[in-house]
Each structure stands twice: as structure tokens, then as C-alpha cells.
Image (spheres, coloured by chain):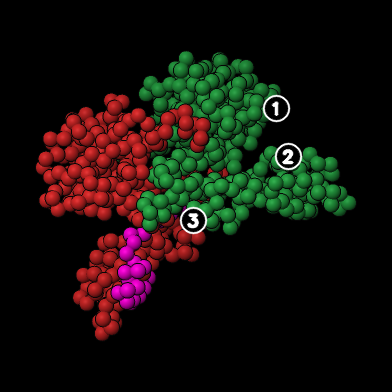
Chain colours: A green, B red
Amino acid sequence: MANNIRVGIVGYGNLGRGVEIAISKNPDLTLAGIFTRRDPKSLTPASKTPVYAYDEMSNFKDDMDVMILCGGSATDLPVMSPEIAGSFNIVDSFDNHSKIPDHFAAVNKAAEESGKVAVISVGWDPGLFSLNRLLGEIVLPQGDTFTFWGEGLSQGHSDAVRRIEGVKKAVQYTVPIEEVLQEAREGKGADLTSAQRHKRVCYVVADEKDQARIEQEIKTMPDYFAPYDTTVNFISEEEFNKNHTKMKHGGVVIRSGKTSEEHKETVEFSLNLDSNPEFTASVLVAYARAAFRLNQEGGKGAKTAFDIPFAYLTPKSHAQILKDLL
Amino acid sequence: MANNIRVGIVGYGNLGRGVEIAISKNPDLTLAGIFTRRDPKSLTPASKTPVYAYDEMSNFKDDMDVMILCGGSATDLPVMSPEIAGSFNIVDSFDNHSKIPDHFAAVNKAAEESGKVAVISVGWDPGLFSLNRLLGEIVLPQGDTFTFWGEGLSQGHSDAVRRIEGVKKAVQYTVPIEEVLQEAREGKGADLTSAQRHKRVCYVVADEKDQARIEQEIKTMPDYFAPYDTTVNFISEEEFNKNHTKMKHGGVVIRSGKTSEEHKETVEFSLNLDSNPEFTASVLVAYARAAFRLNQEGGKGAKTAFDIPFAYLTPKSHAQILKDLL
């Protein structure tokens, strides 16, 4: 625990604030700076960490052991991750699944050239769920894998509801359909679509005169809601503020397979999270520790959760984890 | 998938037969030989694999890429693992938790000297459960970890019941107490003992005249049963043969912790297994692939599940797992 790994945060939204909290729970890590594209003076971090402009980052090459990138996957990370990996060890949570191979290639090129380690696409999905999807295939080569998301708040779907005229406040929860989840544990339903596995539940604050129209607009919204079993609940603003402001999420990865004709085996990994950004941040911080250590050992290039042994993620010594946890 | 990794099995009991089956599900692996301390002629493997005497093993140094050791942890593996690691890459399932550090040291010494890779203590506990105990601490540094075993057949406890006079057949299942399991998901009960977390259920075939005495002897057996909520069911031999001959097992690892004062997060990993030895074997086989690959890359010495990235366990290419599973 003698190490004191200096971590920088790039981007200070929900995820960045989660990283700030997560670092405080890990005594071997120190939060050394926050970088933002906003006016640095406009941020007042709870930890009183110094805030710098994004463009000043290159002045801190000797002061940050690893940067945790807390931007979005749509436009921020495709640019930032290769750029920053050109000078620093980095960790990101790039979660646009179909573009991961391209992102890996771009970041790998930058990190190979700079001699730094860049861990991409960590968090819980991609991240811990990916590890469990891979593990399931490994230990049960003959079988089916099922991923369910929720019960959890979907930011994208909540935004879609909020764009409807007359909606004052709204959240959307993605909820696995319980019977389908139970069937997955029996290995049934591998061919079902996401819409057949999940339902969508909305809580909306709106004037009574608008409610029938809003409900209709939500339920018929193509792609987002139309193919799903959707429920719309209209509630008071008080109830909304009391019960629907947490960013809960979670989900389940199930692998069901046979080791022989008569023997079925099920492996299941699940998360039940009060705070999606704080938990994601906690995972990012563990991989920041690993990025630094791998680079100290001479490692470089892009890595994913698949490439990093768990021993690199813990502050404990190898002897201690063998004794206490194996 | 061009690799064809030649695997030897050492010891041909339930676990060895499980490994034989597991290798048949993994096209990149070939079962190249079975080694036994019994008379090789006494074994007739389903796969028709050649059987050799244990003492002939040294003649096969060029014919086996990795040996999977299927002996017991009490007396076999403490001797066999260091001995065989002196000439071959090995994988074992050493599960005497308190002696793992000593076993690691002995095997590591042998494997460092021979330049081979020796993966110890894999299977599901130790193994996959250990990975999840470690992961839980990593992602939720402030929290409690709970391991529950079962519902599953305990070989040791079944043997203890079978030694009672008048018992014709018997099995013992370890069963998590459902309310305690539910409470663990809420982070409660970290101080409970194993006896407070599990109950023991026995199914026994015996003459009616002996039943009252047998039940009394079971329930008062020190350590094994006395501290536990124990139920003894007397059943017919037909019912026993029909319902109680599978080696079912499983369990749950739960980590419950807080990322901040108001946010609780739960991580859970569970297994539900029809065949404990076949599933354990399936895990061993994946680590055999990793042992070979690590050694091909110049690796040597003892390793545990904590030290090996999942990418080494799969026959798929890195590009493929990034695309399909991340």
C-alpha cells in the first residue's frame, strides 16, 4: 500500500463526481486534478481538488499517473481517449458496443506510440457483464447466454419522454420480465428479442389535460417504446422528487448450459445498484490502479477487462489475497 | 483454433471422468493420456484414451502439453502437484483453503525450477467463487462479503452419515437458510457463522427399527451436525436411487456495500449445478488452456485464478471476443 497513485479526472458530470467519491474510498489513490472543457472556475468539487482547463492537460504529464476519462461515448471519448492516451495512462468507459473494435484500434495505436496503458470500456456493461458473458462461454461451451438490464433508469429513454410537449418531469425504468428471466435460468428463450425480455415503466409529471395524449405519444414512439410492453404512470411532483431521483440500475447475465447430456449447469452474475454512476466510477478507479501498475511493469497499448488479471485491481498483496480470498 | 493442446489426466475418479467429458466439448484440446496409480488395465475410459501407470509419466514429457491433476487435496495433491510441476505444465483443484499459501509456495518452487506453469486451486470454490470474493472487495471497498454453499451434496457429511451403524445408503445436502440469504442481499448478517447460514438435510435408507437411533446419532454428531439445523428424512431405496444419486451443488457469493452514504450496491454471483465434478472439470480444462498459453509465452511458476486474464481461457481470438462479448 506504499504506492500513492495520482489520478486525474477528465470531465466532471455524474460519472466524474462518482470517480471523485470512489477515489476517497481507496487509500492508495490520490485525486490530483480535475480537467474540464467548461470554465474551471465554474466547478467547485466537494473534495476541493484543483480544477484545470482541458487544454492545460499537457502541462501535467509528470503530475498524473493515470487519467480517468468521464466523457460520453457518442462524441467525447472517440476523440479524447486516443488524444489523452498519447501522453497519459488512461481508463475510459466507452460503451457503444458496436464501435468497440474501432475504438480499441484507435486507442491502441496512440498508447503503443506513447508507451502508455489505456484501459477501455470498463464499468459494468461493458465491463463486469462482459467478463461474465465471456466466462459463461468458457466454462459452459455448450449453452446460451442471456443479458437482462434493470430494473434501472435509462437516461436515453427518460430524455425521449421529456422531449414530449407538456411533460414536466419524467423517468423511464427498464424492467426485466420476471417470467422470461426465470425461463432463462432454465436455459429457455435464447431467441427472444430485447423487447420480449424487458418492459418499460415510465413515471411522468404532467397536467391532467395532457395525460392521455402524452401516454399515447410515449407508447407509440418507434424503437424506443412501440415494440415494448410500456406502462405510463402519472404522479405528482412531490412523489417524483421523493422516489424517482436516484440513478438506480443493474441487471443479470445468465449462462445456462450442459456439461453432459443429463447435467445442466447455470452461472449467474447480477447487480443491484442504487447509483449507476457511483458504481461505474468504482470499477473505473480499480482499473486505473491496474493501468498504472501494468505500465510500471513495462506494459503499453490498449487493454480491456478481458486482458487484466484481478490481482492487478486490488490494493492488497498477492500473499494476502491467496490467504484471505482464494 | 489451429492449436491442438495435448492434455493428460492424472487420476480417474469422478473429477477425472468429468475432465474427459469436458475436453470433448473443447475442439482445441485433445485428451492424450490418462495416468493412474491403479492397474492401468483396470480402467476402460469411455473415450478409449490410452491409460498409463503413474510411474511411467516421465516418459511422456514431449507428448503432453499440460497435465490436469484430479487427485484429492488431503494427501494426493500436496505431493503430486509439486512433483508433476517439475516436468509438466499442470492445473490442480487444491481446495484446502487454509493450506493454499503453503501449497502455492511448494508448487511455485517446482515450477520456477522446471520453467513450467502450474495453475493451482481452480474450480468453483476455490476458483470462480474466489474471483468473485476478490472482485466484490475491489469494486465495493466498503462492504461485506457473504459466501453461501448449496443447495448441494456434501461428500464429507454424506460419508459421516454412512459410517453410522444400520445406515444402508445416505446423502447429505447443505442448504442455505433462505431468510439469511435474503438478508445478506441487504448487507445484513456478516457476523453469522456457517451454522447460522446453512441447514443440513439428510436422506437415509435404513430399517425402521434403527431409525430413531440413527436420527439421534446424526443430529448430535459434533461439528458435522450438532451446531446445525438438521433434518433427517428416511426414504425407500427406490426413492433414493431415483432422486439422490446426482452430485448437485452450487452456491452464492454476495458483496453488499456502499459507494456513498445514501447509495447501496449489491454484486452477486451464483451457481446452480447438476454435476459438481463435471462443472469443476470444465473450469479446470479452461485453465489448462491458459497454462499452456502462458508457458508458450515464456511464463513459469505457480498461478491462481487471480493472476490469469480471462482472454487466456477462451479459444476465441482477441478480436472476436471484443466484437462479440465486450
At numbered mark 3, what does the secondary structure look like: helix, strand or loop? Answer: loop
Depicted A299 relative to depicted B39: above or below? above
Q: Amino acid at mark 2?
A: Asp
Q: Which mark is residue A186?
A: 3
Q: CA distance from mark 1 to mark 2?
A: 25 Å
User: Between residues A135 and A318, which one lies in front from this camera angle?
Assistant: A135
Mark 3 and mark 2 on one chain: yes
At numbered mark 2, what does the secondary structure look like: helix, strand or loop? Answer: helix
User: Between residues B289 and B200, which one lies in front from this camera angle?
Assistant: B289
Q: Residue at x 22, y 44 (%)?
A: B49
Q: Which mark is residue A42?
A: 1
- Few, some or many residues within 10 Å of mark 2 (<14, 14–19, 20+): some
Depicted A83 relative to depicted B193: above or below? above
Image quadrant occupied by the N terminus of chain A: top left
Q: State the extent of the magenta-drawn residues as a range.
A: B229-258
What residue is pinned by disc 2?
A159
**Which image quadrant for residue A167?**
top right
